[in-house]
Amino acid sequence: MCGIVGYIGKAEAATVLINGLRRLEYRGYDSAGIAILDDDRLVVAKAPGKVARLSDKAHADWAPELLQRACTGIAHTRWATHGPPTEVNAHPHLDKSGNIALVHNGIIENYRSIRSRLEGRGHFFYSETDTEVLAHLIGECDKGDLFQAVCDALHQVVGTFGIAVLSSHEPDRIITARRGSPIAIGIGDGETIIASDVSAILAHTQRVIYLNDDDIAIVTADSVDVRDLHNVPVTREIAELGIDPAAAEKGGFEHYMLKEIHEQPDALGNAIRGRLDFNLGTSMLAGMGTSPRELAEIGRVVLLGCGTSLHAGLVGEYAFEDLADIHSEVQQAAEFRYRNPILGSRDLVVAISQSGETADTLAAVREANQKGAFVMSLCNVVGSTIARETGRGVYLHAGPEISVASTKAFTCQVVVLLMMALKLGRGRRFSREDGIKFAREIESLPALVGRVILQNERIAQIAAEYTNNEHAFFIGRGPMYPVALEGALKLKEISYIHAEGYHAAELKHGPIALLQAGTPVIAIACDVPGKDKILGNIEECCARGARILGLVTEGDYATAERMHDAIFIPRCHPLVATIPATVALQLFAYHVARLRGCEIDQPRNLAKSVTVE
Ligand code: M6R
């Protein structure tokens, strides 16, 4: 989705801003732009396509002396919503006078009515965007005080925004504000960096202020003054990021996705560390903020998420029922608030989101809060909106996930859900011995995943046999059913092969009609309950000429021989096995996409953090 960077300080603004935009590339975008202040003049460059193209353009258009002089500016990567990804639609947009520049994430829902009002007053618009309307509105409200003008304009808009505004009449400041679209402000030494994502701030400082909805800040090189939209000062604490900037680099891997797949033993280790109690046979998840009595009173667990996070929730559903004997259900976050969910104080709602910014999941959290449920979150990004709004929950500690295709966040989400289920289970039917046994299984996960990663080369060779197909089916049963969904999602989003995940039993109720000679069927045939049945389903596919890639438990050569190709998954508890099985499918998808020459880290049309509903 769109990305914002703003800079005011002592360095060459264009360089800082373009480097910042590069850090945000992973979020997905299709055009970019930058505005810098040259003394009392705004200069703007925009380009469709990649940040590299914008950089070339800015360096071609702007003299080196100008670049050196300009220490203030704003920049943007745009993921097109209103109008195609053309140069004219790219941000920044200017007001009527050309003295005010604006970059904007989010959607101004009432832009059409504002636009026609402004057109009636002589404004002319060059672009098709909602953002240009807001730029003009701010310009019209500006009576010599940019802060007040932005406040006045924002009072007139309906919708969501994260914005940064620059005026050539007030070169010592940038105004930034948010409603529903994140803004973080990095506090450096004589410089301040505004960004929609802390990845763009990391190279400068670890000290960050997160704006809340309806906060607006006056940002100078050495101060940040946060107020509300009625000009009342508000206090926002400075958070320490504690993120090693190197964690956001590729570290010698060809793609971020491959690096993040390989990081999973460490990421899982971080997610687990200090959270298992081998004495009591339970887990210690302080962020849940619940007493054993409160846990005992929970009557139902509702898991919310989108995409990969939804799939993690589906594994969690099995875990809560199996380990904790508690009714559990998963709901697609986008649908949740529109179905008027039945919730009460005995319902534990767990919002799952890597970014913590997904608009649909955030809206679902707000709905669950309204209904009086006990709401918590499982987020990876510390300080993200969902993490802050839920107030309680468990961080994944997976480290920055840059690749649009989620990998290590999924496996860490699942392991945290397993630990939550263990905790709830110990308050119910799980004995101490059972608890210790399961905790030991969880503890072994980094090593189990390491064993799958050791098969990387073999998986790459297997993948070469599956690169020319345009369709693929993934099948699984029980907790491996969501793994099949996740495997299919990974393959389709990065290789553009049409892939579908099905419960293995469901194939014969329709999808089997699509099988032809050579159609790939990726079957999760590990030693889990229902394995015999899935072997039967595999025979049904073989009989129709499908090519079977099986995920098979280590040592189970009899099953492996029934497949055309096999990847081995270490023997472990069926719920625990969902994690190494998913890692195998991540590697498979990665190598298929690589061999097809796809742009793996930034697949077409996709965004890392989906901040529109
Ligand atoms: O940040 P979130 O976990 O809330 O994101 C949810 C989905 O947008 C995300 O998982 C998406 O499906 C990924 N592209 C999957 O790889």
Image: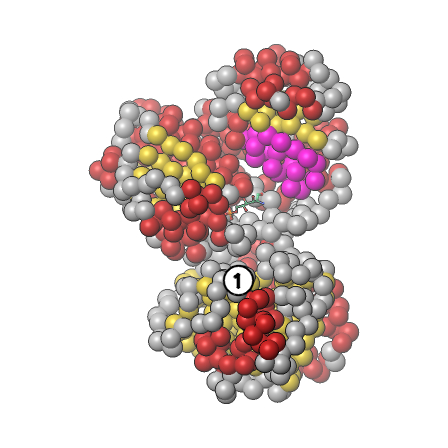
Position of residue 332 measured from the top left corner of the image (x, y, whole percent): 48, 40
Q: Main secondary structure of the magenta part?
A: helix
| Magenta segment includes 315 | no
Q: Residue at x 76, y 43 (%)?
A: 597
Position of residue 93 measured from the top left corner of the image (x, y, whole percent): 63, 72
Identity of the amino acid at label 1? Glu
Which stretch is magenta? 483-501
610 to the left or right of 343: right
Q: Residue beneath label 1, please? A: 109
Is residue 530 visible in the rendered image? The answer is yes
350 to the left or right of 109: left
- Splitting the image into 4 quarters, where does residue 33 fall? bottom right
144 to the left or right of 392: right
Quick one: 90 or 39, which is closer to the camera?
Answer: 90
Q: Quadrant of the N terminus?
A: bottom right
**Eyeballing the image, is 36 above or below 575?**
below
Q: Residue at x 49, y 75 (%)?
A: 153
